[in-house]
Amino acid sequence: MAQLLNNKFMKADYLTLTNGQKVRILWNMNALGEWTSYTGREMNDLASARADVATLRSIAWCAAREGEEAEGRKLEMDEVEFGRLLDMPSIIQFVEILNSQTSGAAQKKSEERPKFPLNLLRR
């Protein structure tokens, strides 16, 4: 039932990995909860823009695990293996998906190309 509701009301976003596999990306309460448990970090760490590349990779992995779970599948790779399949175009694609899932539909501007959030790459 939850999968049916999830698929009916939410636009599904997919990320294409370098091996050609498409995985669903879903950043929601479950993914956030898994990320905080997995990393030991808190939401404040994200809000204060103290995110580095390793943080971005762990967020992507947790969002992919949740997205695949919502589709009734299991992501059969660990974080490092998942990161190995992300090249620069797929990283940018992930950041665009994450921005769209966290910014809300009401805040969308006209058809402007999203910019890569460089603050995620700062130390």
Image: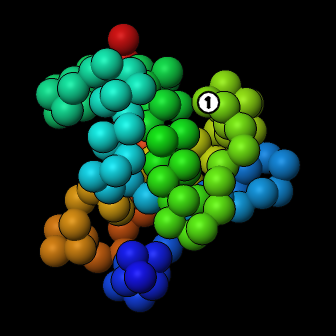
Q: Secondary structure at mark 1?
A: helix
Q: Position of residue 99 (x, y in %)?
A: 34, 54
Relative to 23, is 105 on the left or the right? left
Give the quadrant of residue 39.
top left
The image shows residue 71, relative to residue 56, as above or below, that is below
Q: What residue does disc 1 label?
A: 79
Relative to 94, is 80 on the left or the right? right
Q: Residue at x 54, y 39 (%)?
A: 61
Q: Quadrant of the N terminus?
A: bottom left
Regarding residue 24, the answer to whether it shows in the image is yes
Query: Coloured how?
Result: rainbow
Q: Position of residue 69 (x, y in %)?
A: 54, 59
Q: Amino acid at mark 1?
A: Glu
Give the quadrant of residue 107.
bottom left
Regarding residue 14, the answer to whether it shows in the image is no
Q: From this viewpoint, which residue is outermost toward the front?
A: 1
In front of the other: 64 or 107: 64
Neighbourhood count class around disc 1 (C-alpha, 10 Å): few under 14, some 14–19, many 20 upward:
some
Relative to 35, is 93 on the left or the right? right
In front of the other: 107 or 54: 54
Q: Residue at x 38, y 47 (%)?
A: 31
Q: Residue at x 16, y 74 (%)?
A: 106
